[in-house]
Amino acid sequence: MATPNRHDSANSPGLVNKPGSAHRLGHVALRVEDMERAVSFYRSLGLRLTWEAEDWAYLQSPETGDGVALLSPAYKAAGPHFAFHFKSRSEVDAIHAQLTATGHSVGPVHDHRDGTASFYLQDPEGNWLEMLYEPAEGIPSNVAGQASIPARLG
């Protein structure tokens, strides 16, 4: 018996691999108990702190822009998830409309304080994911002296 091809649109009702699809798996978000310890650990692995807030932090590879979001117990906007990144806000809006049209439950699209926009949903197995627009210039940093790492959405 042949194994279904997970990239075959016939196996993912309502989703097709076409222009406007996710361009890359861009970040993963993890729940952490000790923010300072977690930030220190990921910085020791070569990631750069891009965004720092009381309840979350975002670190990125300076080479690729791929990121790790660290969520404190106080962060309530989202839980652990992974995110597909898109080149334009209109692509996020289009995938939101496509999923809604197929009857998939999705959250509303939100504009975020870091210049991105996204929505959250669960896959059919209950895993949380985010569909995120990342500006071409990258996610702006709120860390003094840090420039944005341009998005590699090529």
Image (spheres, grey):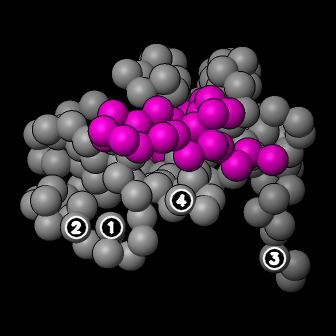
Front disc: 3 or 2: 2
Residue occupying image coordinates x 45% and y 18%? 110
Q: Which structural element holds mark 3?
A: loop
Graded by Cα atoms within 10 Å as few (under 14), some (14 to 19) or many (20 or more), the crowding at tag 1 reads some
Magenta run includes residue 39 = no
Q: For the residue carrying disc 2, how many other residues have a C-alpha within 10 Å: few (<14), some (14-19), or many (20+)?
A: few
Residue type, label 4: Pro
Residue range in magenta is 129-154
Q: Residue at x 30, y 39 (%)?
A: 144
Q: Is residue 102 left or right of residue 16?
A: left
Residue 53 visible? The answer is yes
Give the CA separation, mark 3 to mark 1: 40 Å
Q: Residue furthest front?
A: 145
Q: Earlier in the sequence, mark 2 or mark 4?
A: 2
Residue at disc 4, secondary structure: loop
Q: Amino acid at mark 3?
A: Thr
The circle drawn on residue 43 is: 1
Give the mark nearer the N terminus: 3 vs 4. Answer: 3
Q: Which mark is residue 40?
A: 2
* Residue that mark 3 sits on: 3
> Label 2 to label 4, Cα distance in Å?
16 Å
